[in-house]
Amino acid sequence: MKDNIKFIDLQVNGYAGIDFNSMILTEEQLLVACKKLEEDNVEGILATLITDDFNKMIDKIKNITSIIEGNDYIKSIIKGIHIEGPFLNSNDGYRGAHQREFIIPPDLEMAKQMFDSANGLIKLFTLAPECDDNFSVTKFLSKNNVLVSAGHSDASLDQLNEAIDSGLKLYTHLGNGSPSFLPRHDNIVNRVLSLAGKISICFISDGIHIPTFVLKNYLNAAGMDNCIIVTDCMSAASAPPGIYSVSHISVEVGEDKIVRQIGKDNLAGSAITMKETEKILSEQIGLSNSNIRKIMYENAQILLGRK
C-alpha cells in the first residue's frame, strides 16, 4: 500500500490522548491531536461530539468552535464538527454507549441552538429519523447545508425514504449502534443497504465493530461509490493502551485495541487509526488501491463538497 494515500475521517471523537469531548479542551491539546493526525496521513476530519447534557453540549460546541476558528493550522485539519446525539433512539442496543438519560427526541429549537453555537462549523449531524417528528430537524439542518445522517436508529424503510426526501444524505457506522440480535430479514442493516445510491453509508473497519468478512459483504452490497470508511476513534487512537475518557464516559483500551466502558461489554468507539484501517482493507479484505482511496478519501471529500 502506498504511504502517500491521504485520508478524510468524518467521525473522530479524539486522538493521540486528546478527548475532543472534554469540557476543558484547549488549543494546545487540539494542536497535539492535529499534528499527530497529519503524521498519520489524515488530511482532514470532522471532530465528533457525542450525546451529553444538552447545555454541556452547547458549551463544548462553543469551545471547540472558538479554538478551530482561532487557529489556521487546526482549521486546516479539522474541517468541521460532527454532532452525534442527543437525538438518537434511546432503546438498548440502538443507543450503543450513548447514555439514555441524555438522549432526547429531536427538537427544532435545540437544533437551531446547536447550529448557531457553531458559527457554521457543524457539517454533519447524526440522528434517528424515526424520532424526528415530521422530519423537521432533518429539513432544517439540510436547508442550512448540514449533512444529515441516520444513526443509532431503527427507522423503517418508509421512514428512511421519507427522511431521504427531507434531506437525509448518509448513514452513520452501519452494522453498529444496533442490537446484537436482529430480525432475520427486515432489520436496519438490510433496510439501509437497500438504499445504497440514495444515501452514502459509513462503516467502521477495525475488525472489531464488524468482522472483516461481514464488512466485505456490506461493501460489495452497497458498492464502493456509496461507502465511506470512518474510524469513530476516541483519544486512545495513536496512543498506548490504558484508561481514557470519551466525554464523561471512562473506557479501557487493551493491547487488542478494543474500547469498552469500564465494567460493561458494549463497545465505546474505536482506537484504530486510518493507516491501520487501510492495512485491514488491503490485506484482509483485498481491496485495490483505487477502491481504498475512494472509500477512505474521495467519497468523503465529495460529500463535504471539496471536490
Image (spheres, rainbow, N blue to C red):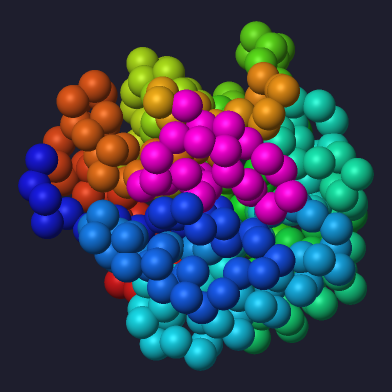
Q: Which quarter of the rendering shows the N terminus? A: top left
Give whichever of 233, 194 is nearer the camera.
233
What range of the chain is rendered magenta? 232-254
Instruction: Give the vertical position of 137 relative to 256 (above or below).
Output: below
Residue 282: quadrant of the picture:
top left
Q: Is residue 183 magenta?
A: no
Instruction: Give the vertical position of 286 relative to 48 (above or below).
Output: above
Instruction: Give the vertical position of 22 relative to 251 (above or below).
Output: below
Residue 59: quadrant of the picture:
bottom right
Q: Residue at horizontal 66%, vertical 78%? A: 63
Disc tally is 0
State the residue lying farthest toward the left: 2
Instruction: Give the vertical position of 167 relative to 105 (above or below).
Output: below
Name the spot of residue 235 as percent of width and height, x first: 50, 50
Name the spot of residue 225 as percent of width and height, x first: 33, 46
Give whichever of 122, 268 is nearer the camera.
268
State the residue lying farthest toward the top: 184
Q: Which quarter of the rendering shows the C terminus? A: bottom left
Q: Is residue 6 visible?
A: yes
Name the spot of residue 54 as percent of width and height, x first: 85, 63
Q: Residue at horizontal 41%, vertical 63%? A: 33
Q: Is residue 153 visible?
A: no
Q: Is residue 78 left or right of residue 260?
A: left
Q: Is residue 144 left or right of residue 69?
A: right
Give whichever of 287, 268 is nearer the camera.
268
Give whichever of 217, 4 is nearer the camera.
4
Residue 120: quadrant of the picture:
bottom right
Name the spot of residue 259 as percent of width and height, x first: 54, 32
